[in-house]
Image (cartoon, helix red, strand yellow):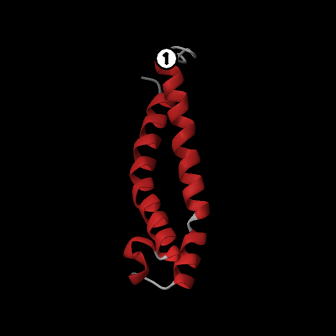
Amino acid sequence: MNTLTFICLKLVRWTGWLLLPVVLAFLVTGYAMSGRYGFSVLTDEKTALTLHKLMHLPLGLLVLVHVVPSVYLALLRWGWIKQRRTS
């Protein structure tokens, strides 16, 4: 396993774990804003909207950093691209 593959694998694993609470918080604030499923008792609509808007950038960055190495590793695994050789 070369360095690029190792780094991609670590990025996919770490961002996967970081995405879990961010996505859950994103869903919770969205449901709190709309008042569905009883999540409105957690916070008021204005606070939920503020928190929801603040999560767009971290969520987008985490998804990007998670998906790009995942696609690279998948293409390697499927043989669509060849693994680089280390010298």
Residue at the image position 38 percent from the left and 76 percent from the top:
38
Check disc 1 and report its element: helix, strand or loop.
helix
* Residue behind mark 1: 78
Tell me how many marks there are.
1
Residue at the image position 52 percent from the left and 76 percent from the top:
33
Q: In the image, residue 36 lies at what x, y percent? A: 44, 72
Q: In the image, residue 40 lies at what x, y percent? A: 43, 80
Q: Quadrant of residue 13?
A: top left
- Left or right of 56 in this view: 74: left
Instruction: Tell me the crowding category of disc 1: few under 14, some 14 to 19, or many 20 or more residues within 10 angstroms, Cα based.
Output: few
24 over 31 or under it: above or below: above
Q: Nearer the viewer, residue 45 or 86?
A: 45
Residue at the image position 39 percent from the left and 71 percent from the top:
37
Q: In the image, residue 57 lies at what x, y percent? A: 61, 61
- Left or right of 74 in this view: 57: right
- Left or right of 45 in this view: 38: left
Q: Nearer the viewer, residue 11 or 56?
A: 56
Q: Nearer the viewer, residue 77 or 9?
A: 77
Residue at the image position 57 percent from the left and 37 percent from the top:
68
Q: Amino acid at mark 1?
A: Trp
Q: Quadrant of residue 53?
A: bottom right
Q: Assign the N terminus to one quadrant of the image.
A: top left
12 over 34 or under it: above or below: above
75 over 27 or under it: above or below: above
Q: In the image, residue 32 lies at what x, y percent? A: 47, 75
